[in-house]
Image (cartoon, rainbow, N blue to C red):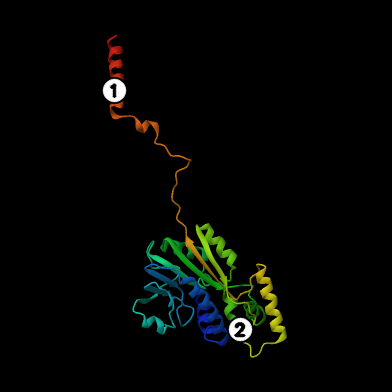
Amino acid sequence: MKQGFQHSLNQWYSTGSGRAVLAQEKVLVESAIQNLFGYFIVQLGVPSSEHLIASSRIKYKLLIDPILEHESTEAHKDPHCHLIRADLDYLPIGKEKADVVLLPHTLEVAADPYYLLRQVDSMLVPEGHVIITGFNPYGCFIMRHRWFKRDRVFEQAKLETSQRIKEWLQVLGYDVQIQNYSSVTCFVRRPSVGVLITLVEWFERVLSGLGLQFGNVYCLVAKKRVDSPTLVGSKWHMPSWMAIPSRGVVSATRANSESVRDNSKR
């Protein structure tokens, strides 16, 4: 796990630009979890000083992080919210115990993202939900900080597109129910709105309408699919041999034994 990226992300979220991006992400997560229910919700990774599952209606909340340097005051106020320090590569959650699992930029710090998804799949109950947030590599603001400003935060991150994450989830047998992006903007902090900035953001919105997404953060919600066997055919019938009465079996056995005796006498 890339703890350097997580530590840098904690610091970046305390800056003005980071707080603006975090506010966009919180809107996406709150919208995703408002209609999800169960007994336990787990957040893997705490990239900011506040946890993102505070608004969840699920009673018991678990925050799992290998560092937990910034412990949220919201977590301490909630008696049903528990902080757990653990390595994300070796999660201390049993099989089929969690109803909802949130991964806020967690796949971007994992040494093996697909292995982490398999662990999440193991801990989720049947028809449970996983929520994944990540930085869009093609987001205008992300590209500015990653390629032009050479921001150390994004140089350490292993950014994946939402389409790649969807492919991983489909291989594991998940149905992606929601795919949302944050607002399209290149400059989350700007003292004034210039003509060039307005033109760039208008062009981005046009491309987003065509299916090319340029939001800074994406949010995926997927449901664990449970396949049940179904009977094939227009009408199901009991096999004919199951309908044979027991006395028929006995009489057939007696007939066979009697024929064997007659043959032996001869």
User: Which image quadrant: the C terminus?
Assistant: top left
- Quarter of the image for residue 74 reads bottom left
Q: Nearer the viewer, residue 194 or 98?
A: 194
SS type, badge 1: helix
Query: Left or right: 113 with respect to 39?
Result: right
Give the crowd class for mark 1: few <14, some 14-19, many >=20 residues within 10 Å: few
- Name the residue that disc number 1 marks: 251
Q: Position of residue 147 (x, y in %)?
A: 66, 78
Report how many numbered discs are placed on residues in the image: 2
Residue positioned 66% across, 90% down in the render: 192
Residue type indicated by callout 2: Val
Residue positioned 42% across, 71% down in the render: 42
Residue positioned 69% across, 82% down in the render: 198
Q: Nearer the viewer, residue 235 or 242?
A: 235
Q: Position of residue 105 (x, y in %)?
A: 52, 73
Residue positioned 41% across, 66% down in the render: 99
Q: Which mark is residue 63?
A: none
Looking at this view, name the residue that lies furthest to the bottom: 191
SS type, badge 2: loop
Q: Earlier in the sequence, mark 1 or mark 2?
A: 2
Q: How far is mark 1 from mark 2, CA to CA?
A: 87 Å
Give the crowd class for mark 2: few <14, some 14-19, many >=20 residues within 10 Å: some
Residue 90 in sight from this viewpoint? no
Residue type indicated by callout 1: Ser
- Quarter of the image for residue 64 reads bottom left
Query: Left or right: 142 with respect to 199?
Result: left
Q: Position of residue 116 (x, y in %)?
A: 48, 65
Residue 148 lies, with reference to residue 121, above or below; the image says below
Q: Position of residue 79 (x, y in %)?
A: 34, 79
Q: Which mark is residue 188?
A: 2
Residue 64 in sight from this viewpoint? yes
